[in-house]
Amino acid sequence: MALAQTTQEGPLGIGAAPRSGELAQWVSRHGPILLLGLFMVLFPIIANDFFVRQIAGWTMILGMIALSLMFLAGYGGMVSLAQMTVAGVAGYMIAVLGVSSLPKVSLFWPWWVAAPLAIVIAVAFGTLAGALSARTEGIYTIMITLALAASFFYLTLQNWPIFNGFNGFTTIPAPYFLGVNWGGPVPLYYLILFFAALSYAVVSYVSRTPFGLALQGARDNPRRMEAIGYNVTAHRIAAYAFAALIAAVGGILLVWQNNQISPFSVGVDVVINLLIIAVVGGLGHPIGPFIGALIYVILRTFALDALVAVGLDGRRFQTLIGLGFLVIVLFSPDGVVGLWRRFSARVRGNGGRNGL
């Protein structure tokens, strides 16, 4: 059984864990990621609060949620449009169970009770979504998960006793513990960075485990996997549960970052944006969603000012964002990760011909 052949080496040269005596070679191969990690750790020292919170913070949170979609689509062949909804379930639950500006709705439980319960509820929702869609493929998976996303949006929009209707919740503070107010720009940045790095590392590891390899085998040839004794449906549902865990943590961080949540935080347009982020970054490696999120956040933040600067109607900034994503996909159907792989292959090829 050649399941190991289904894995792909990442665009930054990330492979298996190093054996003893190969530490130098491992560091050389992982150099770009290590340098990126060091840069992210030092970023608050060289950047102001705007870039720390509005650019880096949003990029990592959206990257985490898109990473859950990338895991399902890239390794499992399941394009789920319910991942932002899973994040929204966790976000709403942290508002309902925890602290907000609505004492008649929120239960005001401590964060260390509300956050784990919110994650459990969101993972249960994500697992249910997987159970409903795991036996389908292609457009049917997309339609089922999109229906779940739209249903949750209208539920939150029209339900006032639990979700406070279209007003949603405001003043949802980040926790205060270990003597640190984690709602501050720099502490919240490091909290987000920790979970983003952890999510990236866990997805990279799981993709090389027997479970991850079996999931990729089911993606490529589900009938063969069933024939040799694997329960493809169970593997897919487990993948949905795992992806839901990542999305749920991202949803809670999103609420603490934004200090509020409303139905429009989990609307269908946001669901589509998340899919665009994952596709533009690339579904071939866990770094792709973070690259796509960075591109999206930069375009969303500065497109309006760019249009006004050249004398165009600032209300057309969404068009500029769409054109930017369209250009990337046209030049590289497999996203920025694909561009990097082709560039790296070309450099290695030129180096070999030049005797470097």
Image: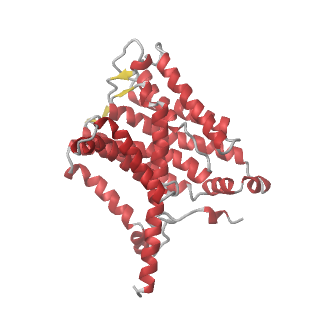
Q: In this view, does 83 lie to the left or right of 313?
A: right
In percent of the image, x 27 and y 41: which residue is there? Answer: 312
Residue 191 visible? The answer is no
When asked about the image quadrant of residue 166, the answer is top left
Residue 67 visible? The answer is yes
Return the x and y of residue 44 as percentages of the image width and height: 23, 49
Return the x and y of residue 165 as percentages of the image width and height: 44, 17
When asked about the image quadrant of residue 182, the answer is top left
Vertical placement of 266 versus 73: above or below?
above
Vertical placement of 290 versus 17: above or below?
above
Return the x and y of residue 318 as percentages of the image width and height: 37, 39
In percent of the image, x 57 and y 49: which residue is there? Answer: 73
Count how many numbered circles sit on residues in the image.
0
Vertical placement of 107 versus 313: above or below?
above
Vertical placement of 328 versus 116: above or below?
below
Return the x and y of residue 241 as percentages of the image width and height: 58, 40
Is residue 348 or residue 300 the one in the foreground? 300
Which quadrant holds the N terminus?
Answer: bottom right
Which quadrant holds the C terminus?
Answer: bottom left
Q: In this view, does 243 lie to the left or right of 46?
A: right
**Residue positioned most to the bottom:** 355
Image coloring type? secondary structure
